[in-house]
Image (cartoon, coloured by chain):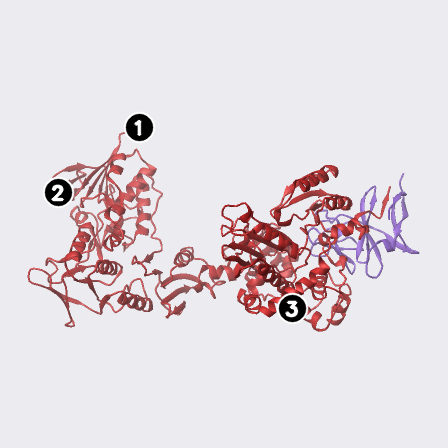
Amino acid sequence: MTMQDWIRIGLLADIPRLGARTVETSQGQVAVFRTSDDEVFALFNRCPHKGGPLSEGIVSGKVVVCPLHNWTIDLATGEATAPDEGCTRPVAARIADGQVWLELKAGLKVAHG
Amino acid sequence: MNAVPRQKLVVIGNGMAGMRTVEELLAIAPARYDITVFGAEPHPNYNRIMLSSVLAGEKEIDDIVINPLAWYDDNNITLHAGNPVLSIDPAARTVTAASGLVTPYDRLLLATGSKPLAPPIPGLDLPGTCAFRDIADVDKMIAAAGAKTRAVVIGGGLLGLEAAWGLRRRGMQVAVVHLMSTLMERQLDVEAGGLLQKDLTERGLHFFTGGQTEEIEGAGHVEQVRLADGRVIPADLVVLAIGIRPNIDLARKAGLEVNRGIVVGDDMRASDPAIYGVGECVEHRGQVFGLVAPIWEQAKVCAASLAGRDDSVYVTPALSTRLKITGIDVFSAGQLAAQDEADQELVYRDSARGIYKKLVLRDDKVVGAVMYGDVADGAWYFQLMREKADVATIRDRMIFGRAYADVSARGKGVDVAAMADDTQVCGCNGVSKGTIVKAITEKGLTSLDEVKAHTKAGSSCGQCSPVVQAILAHVTGEAVEAKAAGLCGCADLSHDEVRHAIVAQGLKSMEAVRQSLGWRSKDGCAKCRPALNYYLLCAWPAEYVDHGQSRFINERVHANIQKDGTYSVVPRMWGGVTTPAELRAIADVADKHKIPTVKVTGGQRIDLLGVRKEQLPAVWADLNKAGMVSGHAYAKGLRTVKTCVGSEWCRFGTQDSTGLGIRLEKLMWGSWTPHKVKLAVSGCPRNCAEATIKDIGIICVEAGYDIVVGGNGGIELRGTDPLCRVATEDEVLEYAGAFLQIYREEARYLERTAPWVERIGVDAIRKRIVDDEAGRRAAFARFIHSQKYAQIDPWAERVQGIDAHEFKSLAEVE
C-alpha cells in the first residue's frame, strides 16, 4: 500500500537559483525548480507537448521554457501558457529549515549530493 | 500486327506547322494513317524562324533543317517536295499536284502557311526585288549581298529588321523604310522603339520612318525607291518585308469557308469535316497567326483531333515576342501601354545603359511587358502574365527583376492570396496556410507574435515569418508593421539600443541592465536573458561572470540536447584532421559508455549520439585523456573549420589549406558569438571545402588567399561576398579575426553573419576591415584580448567538478 507523504529530498542550496534539479521517483522523474525569490516548485519532468525535460529549461518568474520547442509552463500549476494547451502534473513542494520537501508516495531510497 | 486498315492522311505544306502536327500525331497514334506530304519548296522541313540567322551568316541551311529526309523514310511518310498541290476535290477527296499526280485522302491537313504581303507598289516585279519568306529568298539576298552594295528593306517590323540586319552583316549599306513613326510598333511602345532605332542606327542601318513607298524604279533592274514625300533612296536590292497574309488560295478554290484565313473551329477542322487546317493559313475565332507558340499549340490540338480525340480544344495562348538580332535584346508581350485609367504602368529607364522596361498592370495583374536592353526577366513577367498572378505584394520591386523581388521579398513576394489552403507554410512545424488563416479569423489575431504563439508557424527557424506576416496582412486586410527588432516583451528597447547602453553606461551585470533600462520583469525571460548574457560577455570579457542559468541548455552543459533528452558529444578535430590514436580513443569511449550512435558530421568531425546527461563528465574525461577537447558543436560560437587537403597532397592545391584551417581554428575556438560561426578553407578555386557558403571562407589561389564572408548553407542559402585578397596566412588570421570581432560586437544576438552582412552591406564591412588598417588591427587586438578569457576547455572544467549539480539527480525516491 502506498500513501502520500512529505519526503525530504535535499537542501535548497543544492538547487541553483533560476534552475532546477531532478528527483527520481517510482512514478517518473520530478523536476524541482528554484525561483530567484527562493520559492520551490515541482513538476513531473515531462513537457505536455513532446515530453521534453523541463528541468533543463530556462526559468524566469514562475515559469519555465521547455528546451525542446519553447513551450512555456507555469511552475505552480504545470499548465502550458496560452495559447498552448496541456498540463504536466505538479507536485506539492515546500521548504523548512533550508530543506526541500515534496509530497510524494512512499519513502526516500537514496539521496544524492 | 494491326489489322485495321490505315486511313490516308494527306498534308499540304511541308512547313513547321504541318510537320509539327505530323510529329504530334505520330506520337499519339502512330498506326492510324498512311501519310503523304506535299511541299512547294524542294527542301525537307526546316525552321523558317531561323532564316534570319542564315541570312546573318550565323547558321547554315543544314543547321536549320528540323526533319531530314531520313525522318520521312523512318516514319513511312511519302514526301513530294517541290511539287505543290494545285487543287483539291473535296467531293472526290483527292488532291492534284503540279506534276499531275492525283492522291486520294480520307483526311486532309492544310498547312499552306502564308505569303508575303504585297501592296500594289509599281515596280515590285522588277528584277532585284524579293520577299523574306523562304530559302529561295534568302539565297537571292545572299547572292545580292555578294555582288551589290545598296539594299532597301521595306518594313520596319520584326521581319524587316531581321532582314536588314542580316544584309548589313553581309556588308551591304541598308536603308529601312517604315510606314509608321516607330519601329516594331506592334510589339514595342514609342520609348523602346526609339531605343531600338538608336541602337540599330549606331550599327549602321539607315531609317526612313513615316515613309510610304510610292514606287520602285529602275530600267530592267531596281535602281531606286521613291517615297511619297519625294525622298529617293538608291537601291541594288529591294526586300519587301511588311508582313504576311494567310495563304488561302487552294482552300478558297475548293469551296471551303475562308475569311482572312481558312476558318477553323476549336478542333482545328475546316468547314469540310474531312479537312483540317493549322498554322499561319488558318483563322480561328477571327484571329490569324504569325508567331510560333500558338501554332505549336494548334499542332497539338489538331493532331489529337486527327487521332480521333474530340475533347481537345484550341485556345490561343498569350503571346510574347523576341527580336533575333544578335546583341539587341527586345522582349514584348501583351498590352504595350495602359489603355484606360484602370491600367497602370511601371517604368524603369536607364538611358545611359540603354535599358528600358515597362510593365502594364490591371487589377494587380500583369497584362503587358515591353523590355529593351535587359530582357532577362521577360520569361518571368510573361509567366506572371499567363498565370494571371496577383503581384500586389511585389509591385514595388518587380520592375527590378525576379532576383530582386524574390530576394528582398523573401516571403513578402509570395502570392498568399493565390496560395492553396493546404500549402505548408511552416516546414518545421507542419503548419498550413489554412491553419494560419483559421487561427487569425477565429481568434482575432493581429500580430505576428500572436500567430506564432497560436499556430507555431515561424516559431522554429523563423524563415517563414515573412510569409506568415503576409498571410496576416492578407487576412486582416491591413499592412502589419514589422516591429523593429525588439529584444522581448520585458522591455521596449531594440537589440541595438541595449547593446549601446551596456557600453555607454558601463552596465556590467544583468541586474544592472534590467534596472537601468526599465525592464518590466525582475528576472527577464528566456528570450532576453541569453541575449543579455552574450552582450555583457562580449562587452566585458575580462569582468563579466557568465550566467549559466541564462544560457540555453546546450551551452549550459556543453552538449547538444536531443529529442529524447539525451545528448550528443562532438570533440574538436582541428581542421578536420585526426589520428589513429584519436580514432581509437573515440571507439573506446563509444564501447565503454555504450554510446548507441557514432556519426560523421557535416563539419568534418565525429558525433557521439545518445549520451545520457549523467554520463557526460565520464565521457569527456576519457576524451580529454586522449587529448581531445570540446568541439563547441552546441555553441553560439565557433563551430568548425572545414578544410580540403590542399598543397600537401592535392595535385591542384595552391596553398596549405589544412594548415591554415588549423591555425584559424586554434585562433578562434572557444569564442562566443551572436550565433554559430562556421569557417572553411579551400586549397584552390575548385573550393572542395565549400568555403563560399560559410560565415568566413578562405579560398587559396597562387597569388594568396581570397577571403569571403557572410555565406550560409542552412536555412537560407546565401553565397559569400568577397571581402579581399591577401598575400600571407598571417594576414588571413588578422582580417578574419577582425571580421569576427566586428560581427561579435555589432550583430544582434541570434543573427548569423549572412543576414548581418546583408543588413549592413559588405561595402561597410570592407571599409572597416580592408580600407581602415588601424581599425582592423584594433578589432583584431580586441578579439585576441577576449580570447584570453574564452579559450578554456569547458569539458575539462566540468571533469574537474564545475557545475557538478548539473549531472546528477538531487535524490531518488521509491
Chain letter of the residue beneath label 2 in the structure image: B
Q: Which amino acid does the dot numbered 2 rest on? A: Ala
Q: Residue B230: x, y in percent?
A: 14, 72
List the residue tagged with mark 1: B2
Q: Residue B497: x, y in percent?
A: 66, 70
Label 2 and label 1: CA atoms lie apart by: 34 Å
Of circles 3 and 1, the one toward us is 3
| Left or right, residue B194 beside residue B676 | left
Q: Do the residues marked 3 and 2 share a common chain?
A: yes
| Left or right, residue B321 beside residue B648 | left
Q: Residue at x 19, y 57 (%)?
A: B117
Q: Residue furthest right?
A: A97
List the residue tagged with mark 3: B496
Q: Earlier in the sequence, mark 2 or mark 1?
A: 1
Chain letter, colour purple: A
Q: Residue B702: x, y in percent?
A: 49, 54
- Front in this rendered view, residue B295 or B232: B232
Q: Residue at x 30, y 57 (%)?
A: B324
List the residue tagged with mark 2: B98
Can you say which quadrant of the picture contains the N terminus of chain B? Answer: top left
- Is disc 3 placed on a helix, strand or loop? helix
- Front in this rendered view, residue B495 or B7: B495
Q: Which amino acid does the dot numbered 1 rest on? A: Asn
Chain letter of the residue beneath label 3 in the structure image: B
Q: Residues within 10 Å of mark 3 (few under 14, many from 20)?
A: some
Of circles 2 and 1, the one toward us is 2
- Is disc 2 placed on a helix, strand or loop? loop
Q: How many marks?
A: 3
Q: Earlier in the sequence, mark 3 or mark 1?
A: 1
